[in-house]
Image (cartoon, helix red, strand yellow):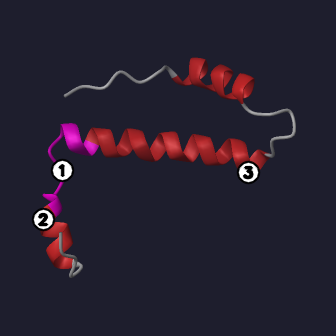
Amino acid sequence: MTVAVQPLKQYLHTLADELPDTATTDEALYHLVLRREIEAGLADSEARRTRPIEEIMQRYGMHE
């Protein structure tokens, strides 16, 4: 499954337009880091570098 990701430059323009005028640098960075982490997760998923949810739940003693 390939997910289309908005090009970074376009994303930055969109982010600048959507953030309130009072937004802080930390708020902008939060959104950039979030995007980076999501892209990394999608890349891991596409490369099959993931673990089944059942395995993770068992590892941490979680039950459905």
Q: Is residue 46 magenta?
A: yes
**Mark 2 secondary-structure assignment:** helix
Residue at which label 2 appears: 54
> In the displayed structure, would residue 35 be above or below residue 5?
below
Residue reaching furthest right?
22
Nearer the observer: mark 2 or 3; the answer is 2
Residue at which label 1 appears: 49
Q: Residues within 10 Å of mark 3 (few under 14, many from 20)?
A: few
Earlier sequence position, callout 1 versus callout 2: 1
* Magenta portion: prevailing SS class: loop
Q: Residues within 10 Å of mark 1 (few under 14, many from 20)?
A: few
Tell me whether the residue at label 3 lies in contact with that at label 1, contact meaning CB atoms closer than 8 angstroms.
no
**Mark 3 secondary-structure assignment:** helix
- At 70% from the left and 27% from the top, the residue drawn is 18
- At 66% from the left and 46% from the top, the residue drawn is 29
- At 13% from the left and 58% from the top, the residue drawn is 52
Given the image, on which type of amino acid does mark 1 rest?
A: Arg
Counting from the top left corner in percent of width and height, residue 57 is at 19, 71
Nearer the observer: mark 3 or 1; the answer is 3
Nearer the observer: mark 1 or 2; the answer is 2
